[in-house]
Image: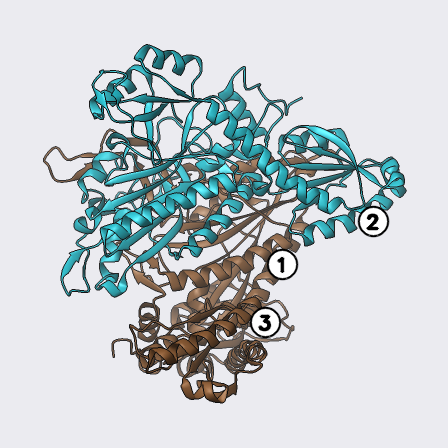
Chain colours: A brown, B cyan
Amino acid sequence: MSKELTNRSDDYSQWYNDLVIKGGLADYSAVRGCMVIKPYGYAIWEKMQFVLDSMFKETGHQNAYFPLFIPKSFLAREAAHIEGFAKECAVVTHYRLMNDPNGNGVIVDPDAKLEEELIVRPTSETIIWNAYKGWIKSYRDLPLLINQWANVVRWEMRTRLFLRTTEFLWQEGHTAHATKDEAIAEARTMLDVYAAFAENWMALPVIKGVKTANERFAGAEDTYCIEALVQDGKAIQAGTSHFLGQNFAKAFDVTFTNKENQLDYVWATSWGVSTRLIGTLIMAHSDDHGLVLPPKMAPIQVVIVPIVKTAEQLTLIDEKVNVLRKELISKGITVKYDNDDKQKPGWKFAEYELKGIPIRLAIGPRDLENGTVELARRDTLTKSTVPLQGLEDVIIGLLDEMQLNIYNKALAFRDGMITEVNSFDEFKKVLDEKGGFISAHWDGTPETENIIKNETKATIRCIPLDNSLEAGNCVYTGNPSIQRVLFARAY
Amino acid sequence: MSKELTNRSDDYSQWYNDLVIKGGLADYSAVRGCMVIKPYGYAIWEKMQFVLDSMFKETGHQNAYFPLFIPKSFLAREAAHIEGFAKECAVVTHYRLMNDPNGNGVIVDPDAKLEEELIVRPTSETIIWNAYKGWIKSYRDLPLLINQWANVVRWEMRTRLFLRTTEFLWQEGHTAHATKDEAIAEARTMLDVYAAFAENWMALPVIKGVKTANERFAGAEDTYCIEALVQDGKAIQAGTSHFLGQNFAKAFDVTFTNKENQLDYVWATSWGVSTRLIGTLIMAHSDDHGLVLPPKMAPIQVVIVPIVKTAEQLTLIDEKVNVLRKELISKGITVKYDNDDKQKPGWKFAEYELKGIPIRLAIGPRDLENGTVELARRDTLTKSTVPLQGLEDVIIGLLDEMQLNIYNKALAFRDGMITEVNSFDEFKKVLDEKGGFISAHWDGTPETENIIKNETKATIRCIPLDNSLEAGNCVYTGNPSIQRVLFARAY
């Protein structure tokens, strides 16, 4: 069958690609490194956007929109920013095409060369802080709490559907504050928002931490992150929140008059999550049969399939289902009734299993006689016969139970994949044989971190925020260490 | 006062720019022709998106997302498409920056030149139909009803905030059908959706029509449009829906097996509205005091301002207002209570008038004693004292009344600005002295249309869909004509 997936144990990477393509979540495009997000994948993104956007607004943020293009000179203004990552990007040099005088389609008009090249935003700190300069004069204009939903482009050499693409969709918050403490508090608040979203909605346990200097966002003073673990034992950075100090304010000369009537530079944060969350969601929960979606992230939560031989049987079932459907919808549950006769029930069952619809109901004439339905839950792949009477409440309860079950399963897996090691041999052995997070002492130097990265491909994912201090010796150099940090190989 | 606007009668164009900038709707950016959409302007866009997106979904469409970049060769595949408009666009030629060896910031890395240039999408027919080729095999895959919310770039020489910018936000629907009739019906359905949105939500009367060949979308067989009129007597094309025939299917070789098992090319439509709608909304209803927003498009529908001298007075009013606020919010009304003491009531009144908040309530200690509030409505600028008791119902009724009042005012204005003329002298006189739509006979040739355009700057905005046939003579050539068409100068 063409919808068959590679097994995770045979080739995890191929399993993931199969699932994304065959599950109708995304497709490759004609443009290198860019993907098409297909309707089913986009519906998951819409759910994510809706919830996150509400959470941003509840915490006082407003949306706005800034230009796609950034003048090349802007990127160079914040020195660490351009050094760090802003070089691999799409550069617009011309603004017109013309007919090829030799008749071969169109060519770039050489007369339409821009005086200064424009960069397709890889992130928007520079263009936004240039705008903030005109908006902020006094402490009365602060805090400025703005978010943008946008597409960004980073010219990636190796791409992977959803997890790393040249163009991706994201949100980027950019806030301005009168004091350092307030900016740090904002960065931490947004990290909490991300963690709450991952855990409560995506059923994804995450570790909140702070990045080492090596792994910090270019231009930040501190980068906070949420780190998740997926089924092959690799880590995924699922969201970041940066305390930017006064770096961008200084680069773009954004000052304000404080309450004491003195001029000071503004303090900044930025924070973002992207369509990478969809890849993380898929990798975290799905199985060899297809997607497993936590009910709160499922575009369709319940699918109903009639099993009939005659048109009269279908009419009777249609009636029954229409009542049930309306009741479920009125309780906020998304339902699809698939009575399309182009496909057989067996095909539909496989399709909805692949697509991770949490609950599948099947109703045949005998069910109608008995007042029952067959209920299949996607997370455990179990089936049971349940009475039609009171079914709405059963479904509501079950969706909650499944949400929790999927979270608990991911949590147990993740917790079992955090291993403390005390020697570099043990470090390499666990990394190769088990994977996951390795909790190890580190001497705090970027040099040691780099050596370990070069030797093992593992990076320090974060220093957990709730880390307990513990004296020890660096797993690599033996030098004194004050705490363990989390290493892992990562996507 | 810095928030003062130019009067419409003095300089309509300056009035509009003042309003957009001082009203906090948008700002100029550092990138030529690109604007920043500020939070208040973006909040209007969010309302538009929410309503339109629901309407698209109710008519069976799903959202998806396609790449920002289009390979240059794709644009040339549909000959009329590239000839018509796709040449003024942003061209990506390189994918990396590098440090300037002379130490002057960064330069474009000459080694990072793309083999084929990429165009920042001016519209997505080509990249989408290239994807559809892989998705459509059989009539079972049709219709394919997809919409995308996206940014697009057209290198405009003369720009105007919201109405014509190099980058703008829009939605573009791209549908694929098994038959010509079905595709035409789809294009007409979406035109009706746009018209209903403009009239019922934006309080904007529009004329539904079809474009002449000259004004048709490049690559379309027919372009349907909604045309609005704003206060200076100019027309604005507020939305278009195109029947594309099989042009893109042929250009990208998209065929399907029909029910009779024969191979045929797929039929197509595309349709879009953009952030230009925000400019149209502003121009249609606003006055010399600022924005006038129909309540259904207002991000804040009711603002409440306390008028107090002491903290105790404020405490009493806070209590009263909090009850009222909750009641209004529970009825789906958006309310802002502005008890910020940084600004005086007079400043707030002017600010909310400028921002077009439909209803402003002011409450002072005497109101509290009397159980009243002062209610000011933005559309008529009238004030009245109304009892607190039952105020929610008064407000709900008034918001409806204002929505209708704003629509009726715009309708009366528009209807009064459609003038039938029967000679070219009359045509020019009405155009210069009155403006608006000119209903005139035309001989049906592109040549005549072009001459009239060159002589008067008026174009044929549309042939109304409900046009009655009427024999006559072309206002310019005197040749026979079967119907009047609508000319106007347009944004």
Where residue B443 sits, quadrant-wise, is top left
Q: Which residue is mark 3?
A: A481
Q: Which mark is on residue B28?
A: none
Q: Amino acid at mark 3?
A: Ser
Q: Amino acid at mark 2?
A: Glu
Q: Of tags 3 and 2, which is closer to the observer? A: 2
Q: Nearer the viewer, residue A379 or A435?
A: A379
Residue B374 position (above or below residue B262): above
Q: Disc 2: which chain? A: B
Residue shown at 44% from the left, 56% from the top: B58
Report whether mark 3 lies on the same chain as mark 2: no
Specify which label sits upstream in the sequence, 3 or 1. 1
Q: How many marks?
A: 3
Q: Disc 1: which chain? A: A
Q: Position of residue B188 (x, y in %)?
A: 34, 45
Q: Position of residue B358 (x, y in %)?
A: 64, 36
Tag 1 secondary structure: helix
Q: Are marks 2 and 1 in contact (CB under 8 Å)?
A: no
Q: Which residue is mark 2?
A: B319
Q: Are marks 3 and 1 in contact (CB under 8 Å)?
A: no
Q: Of tags 2 and 1, which is closer to the observer? A: 2
Label 1 Cα crowd, 10 Å radius (few <14 / some 14-19 / many 20+):
many
Tag 2 secondary structure: helix
Tag 3 secondary structure: strand
Residue shown at 59% from the left, 29% from the top: B22
Q: Which mark is on residue A188?
A: 1
Residue A477 visible from this viewpoint: no
Q: Quadrant of the C terminus of chain B?
A: top left
Residue A198 position (above or below residue B186): below
